[in-house]
């Protein structure tokens, strides 16, 4: 199932052949630097299966990014319900991403995120999309800014699913973009 395409990327649902890449990005300490845990192969497989099923059922999910040139999966970018009420209201849709480190610095996430914002507003007819990241995650915040999102400092929050054992990962910054901003 192809969600959309960009000049360099196919944005699609996950395939069984993507498991090694999904495992890699969920275990890489650099990719997961702002998350409280790394996933084992079994945990990554279960998460990929969940994301794939969610995409099939709802059309939302963290979609696989594939290079058109080589048909190689490189990471993900997608749209999903944030599910952190009461911090964000039920039904709030977030955009998020992760790439294998060897693909960092090529603008792939920015390219995919711009296409997915168009998809969110034109195909899914959403009024707003949010994104959030650990306050120290400057790389993700830079992407949010490049795709036209604006910081909502009044909406910054301590993430309820980050354990107290990781206080440096609790504080998150919130960015928003509305349909008319794209």
Image (tube, helix red, strand yellow):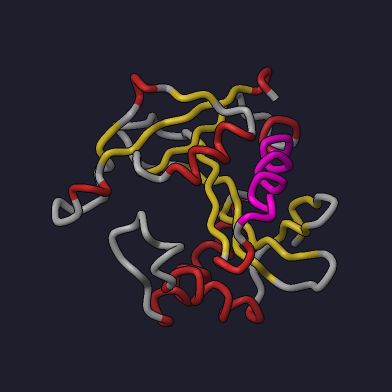
The N terminus is located in which quarter? Answer: bottom right
Residue in the picture at 50% in, 75% down: 24
Q: Is residue 83 magenta?
A: no
Q: Quadrant of residue 19?
A: bottom right
Question: Which is nearer the eye, 122 or 104?
Answer: 104
Give above or below for 52 relative to 78. Answer: below
Residue 124 screen position, x and y as percent: 68, 36
Give above or below for 100 relative to 139. Answer: below
Residue 163 screen position, x and y as percent: 19, 53
Residue 97 screen position, x and y as percent: 55, 52
Question: Which is nearer the eye, 117 or 36?
Answer: 36
Q: Quadrant of residue 86?
A: top left
Question: Which is nearer the eye, 35 or 14?
Answer: 35
Give above or below for 164 relative to 176. Answer: below
Residue in the picture at 73% in, 65% down: 66
Main secondary structure along the magenta-highlighted residues: helix
Residue 138 screen position, x and y as percent: 44, 42
Q: Is residue 86 left or right of residue 138?
A: left
Q: Is residue 151 left or right of residue 63?
A: left
- Residue furthest to the front in view is 105
Residue in the picture at 48% in, 77% down: 45
- Residue furthest to the left in view is 165
Q: Quadrant of residue 43?
A: bottom left
The C terminus is located in which quarter? Answer: top right
Q: Is residue 110 magenta?
A: yes
Magenta-colored span = 105-119
């Amino acid at each position: 199932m192809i969600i959309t395409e960009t000049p360099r990327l196919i944005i699609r649902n996950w395939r069984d052949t993507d498991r090694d890449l999904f495992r890699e990005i969920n275990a890489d300490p650099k990719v997961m630097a702002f998350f409280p845990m790394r996933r084992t192969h079994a945990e990554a497989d279960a998460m990929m299966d969940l994301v794939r099923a969610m995409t099939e059922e709802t059309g939302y999910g963290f979609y696989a990014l594939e290079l058109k040139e080589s048909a190689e999966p490189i990471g993900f970018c997608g749209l999903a319900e944030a599910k952190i009420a009461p911090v964000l209201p039920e039904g709030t849709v977030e955009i998020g991403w992760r790439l294998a480190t060897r693909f960092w610095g090529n603008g792939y996430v920015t390219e995919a995120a711009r296409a997915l914002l168009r998809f969110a507003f034109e195909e899914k007819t959403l009024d707003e999309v949010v994104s959030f990241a650990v306050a120290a995650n400057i790389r993700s915040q830079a992407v949010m800014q490049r795709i036209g999102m604006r910081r909502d400092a009044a909406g910054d929050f301590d993430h309820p699913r980050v354990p107290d054992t990781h206080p440096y990962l609790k504080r998150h910054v919130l960015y928003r973009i509305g349909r008319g901003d794209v």
